[in-house]
Image (tube, rainbow, N blue to C red):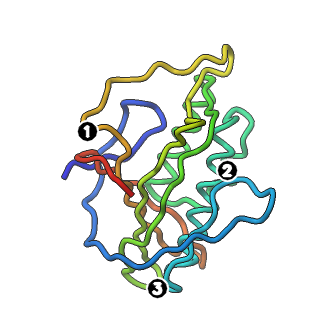
Amino acid sequence: MPTQTPSLDSGQSTSASATPSTSTPSVTRTATSPGSPGVPTPSVTAQAQRAVDSYIAFYNASGAADRDPAHADIAALGRYLTGKAKTLFDSNYASMKKSGLAYRGTAPDPRVKVRQIFSAESVFLESCPLLSATDPYVEYTVSNGKPVAAGVKRNPPPPYLLILPMVKVGGHWKLSDVVQNTSKTCTG
């Protein structure tokens, strides 16, 4: 199956590792507190809950950074990242800042699920991001407000399944890589 590490710069990606076997634990949504930004944290099996909590905290923090990369505290995202994921996101935010790009609209619903629990320190999550039909997440040029031109139309079309390896480092769950399966459209 073709896999790619996604890039916030359209059309750029790097090769990544294969994915583990699938498991299907139950997932229910929990609400965010009133007035809190971002997506709610899903409730999952107890063994993986803190890994999911950490990923959703990262997802919400990176969504805030997407809106103004030039002034975002990108170093603060480091508490949620390690390895290839840290390199990927540091590079993407530096590129967005240098190019004067940002995002507007409603960030995709990540639809996070537990894919596999390997140990008390290693969990793979998966995500099939769902774009908002009424307020799409759009990359744009900050200086003129114009959307960035869409790249080459992809076949099959997105969204693509993301495999999200989470590892416990120094007692904290961190995202270590992002592997994107571009061989088929995911459905949730």
How crowded pointer 3 is (Cα within 10 Å; few <14, some 14-19, many 20+) is rated as few
Cα–Cα span, label 3 and label 2 = 27 Å
User: Nearer the observer, disc 1 or disc 2?
Assistant: 1
Sequence-wise, which precedes: disc 1 or disc 3? 3
- Classify residue 172 by image quadrant: bottom right
- For badge 3, the amino acid type reads Ala
Which residue corresponds to mark 1?
156
In terms of secondary structure, where does tag 3 sit?
loop
> Measuring 36% from the left and 80% from the top, which residue is drawn there?
118
Q: Are marks 1 and 3 in contact (CB under 8 Å)?
A: no
Left or right? Give the position of 37 relative to 19. right
Sequence-wise, which precedes: disc 3 or disc 2? 2
Cα–Cα span, label 1 and label 2 = 35 Å
Which residue corresponds to mark 3?
120
Sequence-wise, which precedes: disc 1 or disc 2? 2
Q: Are marks 3 and 2 in contact (CB under 8 Å)?
A: no
User: In the picture shown, does residue 126 fall above or below 38?
Assistant: below
> Measuring 63% from the left and 23% from the top, which residue is drawn there?
100
User: In the picture shown, does residue 57 fall above or below 27?
Assistant: above
**In the orientation shown, which residue stands out farthest toward the front?**
134
User: In the picture shown, does residue 160 fall above or below 149?
Assistant: below
x and y percentages locating residue 117 in the rendered image: 39, 80
Which residue corresponds to mark 2?
75
Q: Nearer the viewer, residue 22 or 8?
A: 22
Q: Are marks 1 and 2 in contact (CB under 8 Å)?
A: no
